[in-house]
Amino acid sequence: MEKPEKMETFHITTFGCQMNLADSSTLAAAMINRGYRRVNSESEADLIVLNTCSVREKAETRVLGRLGELSRLKQKNPHLRLAVVGCMAQRLGSQLLEQAPCVDYVLGTDRVFDLPDVIRNSNGTQTILTTLGRENIDTITPIKETPFSGFVTISRGCDNYCSYCIVPYVRGKERAHSADFIIDSIRKMVADGVVEITLLGQNVNSYSCDGTDFPALLERAARETDVRRLRFMTSHPKDLSRKLVDVMAGQPKVMPHVHLPLQAGSNRVLQRMGREYTTEHYLEIIDYIRGALDYVCLTTDLLVGFPGETGQEFEMTLKMVEQIEFDSAFMFRYSARPGTAAARLEDDVPEEEKIDRLNKLIRLQNQVSRRRNQREVDQVRFSLVEGTSRRDKAVMRARTEGNKTVLFEASNAAAGDIVPVRITTADAFTLHGRMEETL
Ligand code: SAH
Ligand code: SF4
Ligand code: F3S
């Protein structure tokens, strides 16, 4: 084993999006391949890794708070090593050490998987690596976080430069894995027992490699592998094609769920966000999706308080939410990210107003979610069992085709099974049902 003495165990805490979760699984595999052992709590670990997010100011504040706590832990245990990796490490580089001198290793988004080498070569000195732009860096097969579902990263980075967003700066330009590599990764995971795979990219719809576009990739994944369920995220409205929807309609393995961030309901705001679509175009896509698929769940991201957003423009977001009826939404209030185009605009919506708009939006979306979920009552949804409910071990927790959580009582279902569940009641966040024995 090539690992240094005294450092045997590691723990990774992940902040941010699914891409970071996927990267943490790959990093864990890279560490385990080199003889380290993963432990379940930070207190047992010789090496603590924080895989970080920069998308909102709050995400970074949380990491700095954690580092404050960990620095106290390190004073008690001088053998402890700390690594900060991912988006915030990329953004701040050496500045991070000024704010948190206790950190030993700072590795940017394209250097995360170098951590075992860095530990070996650094001889205990602080190391910062933030070079961006390497091709196909994640060729290690990630460990599975659950025995039956997994992520496959199809592309890294983003070329869209939405004016509010830090991701293109911290993740670099878009780079795609070849379709053959992706198909091979899926096959390996399926051979290892995985039944559901989510294809990941910042904008999966702009995937393109050696003449294969995203619909063609999805079709190949469905036809050429034995995976039982396929999902994908995130879709960008400017690039989502009818061809993709047609593949979804023709391939029962592709789950009927589209996560399609709208961000705002006013064309002037969308234009200033650099989103490159109009609300009319967005509505056309939704109509096409709902026309082509008998059953589909639509989810979205919404951003309130973008610079210059007027009260009237915010009302237009509420109107779109009411009209479209998303099944659920991730809702955020704008925070300026240094170096982005929007950071040069005056952040002129007062904080209390942003909070007020966000609360109004959440209240409306919760009503809409409840309405949508209640429309599922009496329907049968084939659901992938993930485990038991946190509150009650006799209750199983599963994920429907549309990606909703459903709880049901059953003694004859196990994690990893796909079972028919008839929905009996629903609230804004969860479906409840009973397993059908006769189907
Ligand atoms: N690639 C995906 C996800 C990007 S980040 C996409 O294009 O949709 C996830 C969400 O965070 C975004 O959709 C946006 O709603 C939100 N977000 C991004 N930058 C933000 C900022 N500066 N302030 C608040 N929310 C932000
Ligand atoms: Fe950010 Fe826009 Fe790229 Fe999404 S598409 S990651 S919001 S720049
Ligand atoms: Fe994801 Fe946050 Fe980075 S949303 S890509 S972890 S900035």
Image: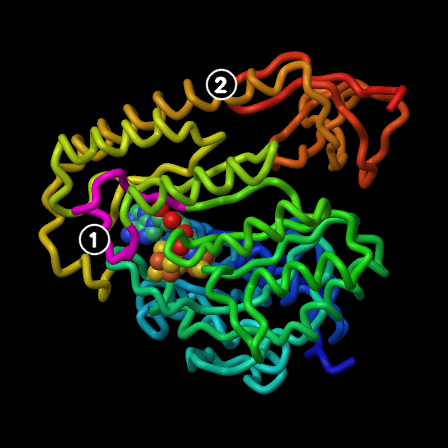
Answer yes or no: is residue 67 visible.
no
Q: What residue is at 52 percent from the left and 65 percent from the top?
A: 82
Q: Residue at x 68, y 13 (%)?
A: 424
User: Against 318, is 128 above or below?
Assistant: below
Q: Which residues are magenta?
A: 261-277
Q: Residue 401 magenta-drawn?
A: no
Local crowd size for mark 2, using a 10 Å CA cut-off: few (<14), some (14–19), many (≥20): some
Name the residue nearer the viewer: 204 or 94.
204
Residue 384: x %, y % from top left: 75, 37
Of residues 121 and 299, the one drawn nearer to the viewer in this rendering: 299
Q: Is residue 220 visible?
A: yes
Q: Looking at the picture, how far across and down is residue 203, in whole percent?
A: 46, 60
- Give, as a three-letter code, the residue at label 1: Gln
Name the residue tied to disc 2: 370
Residue bearing the label numbered 1 = 271
Quarter placement of the C terminus: top right
Left/right placement of residue 6 relative to residue 189 reads left
